[in-house]
Image: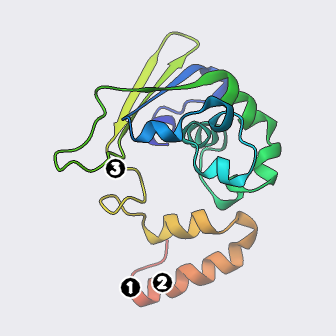
Amino acid sequence: MALVRENDIRPDQIEEVIIGVDAGGFHYCEPVSVRHYPRNAVDLQFSIPYNVANVIINRKVSFEHFTEDALKRKDVLEFLSTKVRSWIDPEVSFDEIGKACTAARIQIKSRDGKLYVKRVDHPKGDPTNPMGMEEIIEKRFAKEDASCLSGLMAGWCRKKKRPCP
């Protein structure tokens, strides 16, 4: 998501997205018949290619993107099936203590020939890269729930003795 936001990359500017993962993570990229053509909400949750396509199209990740309704989003599914591919990237491998790596290297090739590359060693939400309260609330609640959101945020701010954003 950072690569897309930092460079303000829009879906219509993209020629191809290449996701590099380690052999363990590749399980979430294959088989293409499932990861690129999800059949149900669970397929959406466990597809790295879908998650990348979703972030590019929606510029965020939310619970609403992992529902049966999300399976009807032709813009995301078309982008996923035509622009996203995955591979086992030798530069993304098991870490020094032998645990499976959660890293990925994303390359976005634009229509005008630019190449954007970013490696993420610990995705947002990983214990080494935790989400902040604002991110958790934003991810959990839709914009329609703004009153609930502001109430939760106010309660969190009081508890942490911080000013509310």
Q: Residues within 10 Å of mark 2 (few under 14, many from 20)?
A: some
Residue at 38% across / 85% down in the picture? 160
Disc 1 versus disc 3: nearer the observer: 3
**Sequence-wise, which precedes: disc 1 or disc 3?**
3
Residue, disc 2? 156
Q: Nearer the viewer, residue 111 or 28?
A: 28
Query: Residue 30 appears in which quarter of the rendering?
Result: top right
Circle 2/circle 1 CB separation < 8 Å: yes
Residue, disc 3? 122
Measured in 3D between alpha carbons, the distance from the residue under mark 3 to the one under mark 2, in whole angstroms, is 26 Å
Q: Amino acid at mark 2?
A: Trp
What SS does tag 2 mark? helix
- For the rendered model, the colour scheme is rainbow
Q: Amino acid at mark 3?
A: His
Residue, disc 1? 160
Residue at 35% across / 42% down in the picture? 103
**Sequence-wise, which precedes: disc 3 or disc 2?**
3
